Amino acid sequence: MFNRRCLRGFWVFASFILLSTAWPPLARALTWPEIEARAKGQTVDWFMWGGFPSTNAYVNGYAAPRVKELYGITLRQVPVKDIAEVVGKLLAEKQAGKGAGGEVDLMWINGENFRTAKRHGLLFGPFADLLPNQKLVNWGKPSVQNDFGEPVEGLESPWGSAQVVMIYDSKRTSAPPRTVGALLDWARKNPGRFTYPAPPDFTGSVFVRHVFYHAAGEVAVWQGPLDEKRFAAAAGATYKLLKDLAPFLWRQGRAYPENPIRLSQLLADGEVDFAISYHPAEASKMILDGLYPETVRTFVFEEGTIANTHFVAIPFNAADTEGAMVVANFLISPEAQLKKADASVWGDFPAVDIDRLEPAWQARFADLPRGAATLPNDVLQQRQLPEPPSEILIRLERGWDEHVLKGR
């Protein structure tokens, strides 16, 4: 795969000059039908985290055949363990002067990886405002306008939204703890029955951020400029809570699940009593797939749970830029968003504003079955917390590794 776009002498050099200096104005000079015409026959290699079976099935079983049918584009998923690896690859290519013919056409990206890619000039664009379906997105929404505190500025296109939920089996745990503090108390009183993935896994990392908000006793203050003294105090309290909690975790905190899939297996096998997911409908999907018992349910903390938007971006040296733009536009079409929101397919929350859709599409979204373990939208929306800026995320992950994992 990685050898399919070799250097082609002068043409590659000329392409580099074109793409690095003239491409954005050129793109804006094209009509959307002209962009679609250029995209026909292209192969779009989409690099993304490959750990969600439902996501993989959506991309390969639905999105890829559909863009082939509609636009003549071959969409290939390239699963990776961590998109940070791809960002590092792009940075190396940037430093080496490889400005065209890149192997990565599209990335599923957000958070600190977007921040790094943006600040090192690794992204094509701005392109998001060129996509016709962007009219369906509410760009005034803070979690769309900013990605973990970093202004998007057209360098990403949203394709889904997420909110953390806690998953439990109501047959085993009839009255789950409803606050972060109560959950920590529960874990200490029930040794071995709780754990979380090890950061920098995104699910383990978001659990640490919830504990951080709990330890700090406030949320809004972290959305502005970082107060170093206040952060040091809140981070220190976070590490102490988690370090003191470790002996009461599954396997006495000597090992942590490597990802949310492993944590889900532990819950399904009865080894622990809680799992954590960024996807409110994931538990319902796993019930449908026979991976969870029908008694599994979800809840959000009374103080709220963290919510965000996830995006796709195009690298600065993508070989098939037009194809990537067409795929990004398709992903926020009413059809693709409805399919993704179906709990039997994935159950991911829409990136589009349902109120902006035509009435017929609004009705189809309203008719989607919610799933036995999926909370109503109003319950989720009333308890949403913002992500902290990615700088805080990065420092908390490093601090967890130093003070919790290695500090025992």
Image (spheres, grey):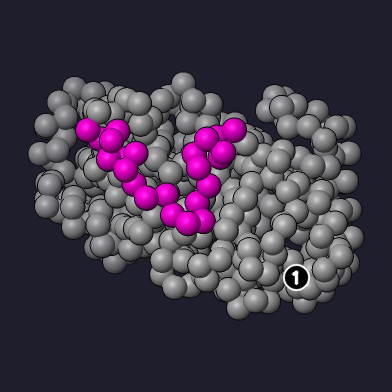
Q: Residues within 10 Å of mark 1 (few under 14, many from 20)?
A: many
In-front residue for pair 20/308:
308
Whether residue 17 sits left or right of residue 383 in the image: it is left
Q: Position of residue 368 (x, y in %)?
A: 34, 46
Q: Which quarter of the figure has residue 273?
A: bottom right
Q: Mark 1 sits on what residue?
A: 193
In-front residue for pair 127/243:
243
Disc 1 residue type (three-letter): Arg
The answer to whether one can see residue 399 in this image is no
Helix, strand or loop under label 1: loop
Up the image or down, 264 lies above or below 239; here it is below
Q: Position of residue 187 (x, y in %)?
A: 81, 63
Whether residue 92 sits left or right of residue 65 in the image: it is right
Q: Position of residue 336 (x, y in %)?
A: 27, 45
Q: Which quarter of the figure has residue 43?
A: bottom left
In-front residue for pair 114/123:
114
| Magenta stretch encompasses residue 380 | yes
Q: Position of residue 325 (x, y in %)?
A: 26, 39
The answer to whether one can see residue 109 in this image is yes
Q: Residue at x 72, y 38 (%)?
A: 303
Q: Residue at x 73, y 32 (%)?
A: 219
In which quadrant of the rendered image does the C terminus lie? bottom right
Up the image or down, 119 lies above or below 113; here it is above
Q: Residue at x 34, y 39 (%)?
A: 366
Residue range (magenta):
360-382
Up the image or down, 98 lies above or below 290; here it is above
In which quadrant of the rendered image does the N terminus lie? bottom left
Q: Residue at x 62, y 36 (%)?
A: 383
| Magenta stretch encompasses residue 39 | no
